Image: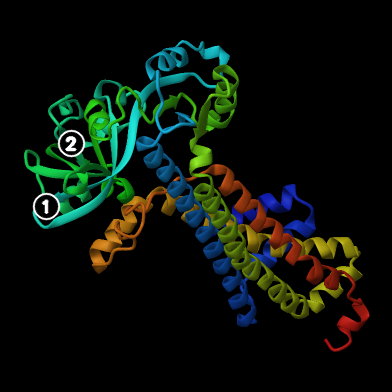
Amino acid sequence: MKNTLSALTQWLVQRLPYEYWIGWRYTRAKRNNHFISFISLTSMVGIALGVMALIVVLSVMNGFQDELRKRILGVASHIEVRSFDVGLAGWQSLQQQIESIPPKAVSSPIEGVAPYIMAQGMLTHDQAVQGVLIRGVLPAQEGKVSELSSQMKLGRLQDLQPGQFNIVLGSDLAMALGVHVGEKVVLMAPQGQVTPAGLVPRIKQFTVAGIFQVGMYEYDAGLALIHLDDAAKLYRLGDQVSGLRLKLADLFMADRVTRELIQALGPNYYITDWTQQHANFFKAIQLEKRVMFIILALIVAVAAFNIVSTLVMAVTDKRADIAILRTMGATPQAIRKMFVVQGAMIGIIGTVSGAVLGVILALNIETVVPWIEHTFNVQFLSKDVYYISDLPSKLMWSDVTAIVGLSILLSLIATLYPSARAASMNPAEALRYE
């Protein structure tokens, strides 16, 4: 280690102006004033912790946003085409019209189109009762617009056959009802039918044919799938459906494709995309990310401005050295550079250390957090409270670059006053009491 430092010092002496290697020497020299060394170390540690926290927190928030988008749009739809009336009639011809749109005619190719019926209902089994959203689907086409087929825990989506009145439940919904595959549940539709005894809700018994698990509590506990024909019979829609669901190759082009579909299909249809349906949700995540960045950046700022205290005390401690250098011909600009280098080295060492630790932790957060939960028997995210029960992480190098740049910039700003004070020091006054 000593040989490495000596070699680096020799390189600095040979290649850099003297004010730079003197500033480097001040940074690594053992000081007689241990309090200055302590403040320097505190500044480095504070900057490192702040940078590490910023990288990890932003990576986790990026992971949350990406995971939520993936899970929501794995069940929901990129674009929905509905009628302004209760049901959409003639959906077969409309589906063919949408599927025939050339890929180059829209901003993102349409990968799949599928009809659906969405309605509310109530499921009962023994003494358990749960309100649910009922989605009628065509199993052969549902795989084109959602990932439910790949998220089946038990059974298959293809087990939904017309006329058999089978049903597929979310895992938490099945647990709440206490049912297993092959058992019966009763579905009650809120739309009633008039009988001699009065208004009676429509009731139909279904057989549980499968259980899916998306990993998002909202869907796992509140969504049930039945065949499109069974849903049309139960809710008396005839040949109508609630609408068509579309999946795009690039989900971020959904708003542009929506506008293009409005022009292509005309004003007779109500077309919405996921950016409208979940706009407030994702805007809230973006706002939280900005606020967290500002709050944690203040930690870096406080640590960086500890450099001011370090350099002010260092300038006072090196009064005699500064005076001797001035009498030997050093300019005020050279003196300023020495202390800028000293403060910058403190900031760079802290920033690089924090960035390395933050990147390592952000890349391994999905391993570290379960280990902490298992070791201390705690659970950070309960799945019945939060949308996601695991802590995801997505490291974005643009965030790392911005954080490192901000930290180094704050460190350089913190050196301006102490270095200017050192440059303005009068050699005669500094040597008077030496």
In the rendered view, does 277 fall on the left or right side of 304? Answer: left
The residue at 92%/77% (across/down) is 426
In the picture, the quarter occupied by the C terminus is bottom right
Q: Earlier in the sequence, mark 1 or mark 2?
A: 2
Name the residue that disc number 1 marks: 178
Name the residue that disc number 2 marks: 167
In the rendered view, does 113 fall on the left or right side of 155? Answer: right
Structural distance between the alpha carbons of marks 1 and 2: 15 Å
Q: Count how many numbered circles sit on residues in the image.
A: 2
Q: In the depicted view, which residue is nearer to us: 246 or 163? A: 163
The residue at 57%/63% (across/down) is 296
Residue that sits furthest to the bottom in the current view = 433
Residue that sits furthest to the left in the current view = 182
Q: Quarter of the image holding residue 165? A: top left
- Circle 1: residue type: Gly
Residue 136 in picture, x, y percent from top left: 28, 32
